[in-house]
Each structure stands twice: as structure tokens, then as C-alpha cells.
Amino acid sequence: MSEAVAFGVGVVGYGWMGQLHARAYSRVRQHYPDLALQPRLVAVADPADDRRLDAAVDTYGFEAASPDWRDVIARADVDAVSVTGPNFIHREVAVAAAEAGKHVWVEKPVGRDSGETRAVAAAVHASGVQSAVGFNYRNAPAVERTRELVGEGRLGRIEQVDLRLLADYAADPGGGLSWRFETARAGSGVLGDLVCHGIDLARYVVGDIAQLICDVDTFITERPRVSDSASHYDKAAGGEPAPVENEDYAGALLGFANGARGTLVASRVAVGEQCAYGIEVHGDRGALAWDFRRLGELRLCLDQDYQDASWQTRLVGPGVGELGAFQPGSGIAMGFDDLKVIEAARFLRSVADGKPQGATIDDAVAASDVIAAMQTSARDRRWVKL
């Protein structure tokens, strides 16, 4: 094991994702013992009540806690800041952190629109700090293998890419009107929440999207109000009804720069679907498919004739992607939290080596540009070129 250098981290936002970042920092050296940097949980900020901040100190071992994110950035012993709060704080906090010389790990979608994403990117590049963005699905070993197979030409010329991102977290009309349903605080709806993951998966595996046409709709147009600290999973029986301001559903036809065609369908109100996120890729010589709910499996149709070809399900092994850092053999499942540990390791390597590894702010800009094109297409009812 190499001698590690202490590396102070701060976390802004102590909801589920902030706690997930804290766990990833805490675990990363257990899975990657040769990392040059040893994360130290220095400070956390969240505007919630004191009990939440006390829990951050008691449970995760943060050395300090504050209701004001500026206190985290001002600390000389904080080298990097994780920005894990709602979309409306992403730009302000991340820009301030980068301008203060702190490396930044920001959750997707990085702001409420492409302008805010680009503002964060500009600050990161101007300051010369490293960045990471929470496109964690690309970190799954099976997804790494899909990228390799496509890059090696095993599928032949890529013809069709189908993306599916369906969830039921907002399917209950009695679910509370949290910040996610308000334009001023979230920006877009399912586009910024789920579609951005699909865009990153498509870009990572196949390549850039060159043109698209998109349709969006809001199926549940009113929800009862809840407190600011509530999540989009919370019920709000008896709350005052208020309008939902962004989209529940998005569907798109995609044209890739390499000539492939694709489809995308996403919904946050799909009854019967829980985290049904996946990608299918068809080439002129083979096909593959990955489903997040079966994280360690890859469905393959390779090296056969054109007609009557069959599918096989393969379990990824320790030699695929980062699985070997977590499990000794095929079939021993990884989990969502593990994908964040991989993300943390790549972020820390980026800082240590001075070279980007994993998803960065530039990937967030690319995704935000596609989302902006989708919004334009849905509004104008036309194809849009990127």
C-alpha cells in the first residue's frame, strides 16, 4: 500500500445523495488501497435542522457542520467540494468552489439549464481544478464492457440505439410538490432527472447525438404542497394543490453522428416501473443490452448468422471494468453505492494526476446541450440539429 496524502473534502447538501458521497469517500481507500489521496471528511453544510447536521458529524465523522455552504468553501483545509443539493444550488456553489481553487464533484444535471452548466464548466476550466459529475451508470462494469465491444467493432456498424428510463417515484398524484416539480428550483423535470443519464450512457457507449426530435408531456398537472425539506417520495395528503411546472414524460427520436438511429423514452410516473433504466444497441453483425436492475449482467447476441441469432446472458467477472475492486468472482452483485465509490476513485485520481478521469463537467455540458435541444424540439415541434 502506498503512502497516501490527506485530502480534505466538504459536502454541500446532506440529503440522500450527500450521504452517498460521504459513504463513497469513506469507502474509497478500502477498495482502492493504492490511491495517492486519502479523503478526510472535513465539513458538511445543509440548511436543515440541527439534528440532521448533528447526525452528519456523529454518523459519518465530519469534523464540522454548518447551515451555510459558504463556511465549507471558506475552509483552507477543504481541497474539494461535493455539490449534492437541489439543482438550484448547483451553479452558485460549484462556481464559488472552483473560483476558490477547490476541485468539484457535482451531481447531475449540474444546474437548471445549459447556461448554468456552462457557467460551472467555465469556472472549472478558468481555475484549473478537476471536476467529476454524477453520471454513475457509466461506471457499471457491464456498461464498460458494452463500450469496449462497440469500440472493437464486435457489433459491426451501429444501426440502432434504444434507451429506456422509466420510474414510478412520481406516479402517485398524492405525492408532494417538492422542488423537483418547480421550474424555478429544478429547471426541467424528467429531462434533467433521468434523461440526462440516458444521454450520457448513449454518448459513452456509442457516440455523440447530432440531431433529434422530442415530445414531452405532464400527466399529473397538480400536486399538494409539502415543506421544503420533503423529497419527491413523500406523500402530502391535505396539502394545498399547486401546479406541476415541468414534464413527467419525454420521448425522442435520435440521430447519432456516426449515422446510427435511436429512440429514447423516459417517465417519472410510469406505474409498475422502478428504476427501469437501460440501453440496447444493434449493429449489422450483433447486438447487446444492459438493464440497471440486473447490474452485473450483459445480454449479448454476437458472432452468429444474420437470421435466427439467439441471445446469451453473461455475468461480468473481476476482469471487467472495476468489478475486481469489489468482488472476487462473477455473479456476486455490486450495488448503486459501489458505482459512487468508483466515481470517487476516479475523481481522486483526476486530482492526483492532474488529468480528467471518468465523467467530468464537459460531459455534463454535452448532456445539457442535448436536453436544451429536446426542449426546443418539443416547443417548436421540429427536428433540431446539435
Image (tube, rainbow, N blue to C red):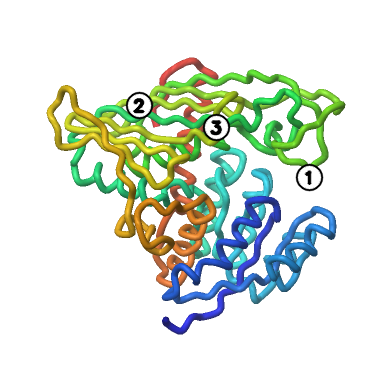
**Quarter of the rendering occupied by the C terminus:** top left
The residue pinned by badge 2 equals 262
Judged from the image, the secondary structure of the residue bearing numbered disc 3 is helix
- Up the image or down, 18 lies above or below 384; here it is below
Q: Is residue 371 visible?
A: yes
Q: CA distance from mark 2 to mark 3?
A: 17 Å
Q: Residues within 10 Å of mark 2 (few under 14, many from 20)?
A: many
Q: Position of residue 375 (x, y in %)?
A: 53, 26
Count of numbered circles in the view: 3
Determine whether, in the image, residue 322 is placed left or right of residue 228.
left
Q: Quadrant of the N terminus?
A: bottom left
**Amino acid on which the number 2 mark rests in the picture:** Gly
Amino acid type indicated by mark 3? Leu
Q: Which residue was labeled with disc 3?
A: 191
Residue 242 image point, x, y percent: 79, 24
Residue drawn at 19 percent across, 27 percent down? 309
- Element marked by disc 2: strand
In the rendered structure, the answer to whether residue 241 lies left or right of residue 138 reads: right
Placement of 127 over or under 268, stated as above or below: below
Q: Is residue 253 left or right of residue 306?
A: right
Proximity of marks 1 and 2: CB atoms separated by less than 8 Å: no
**Which label's residue is closer to the chain start, 1 or 2?**
1
- Give the residue type that dot 1 points to: Ser
Give the number of the mark in front: 3 or 1: 1
Q: Secondary structure at mark 1?
A: loop
Q: Residue at x 56, y 61 (%)?
A: 24
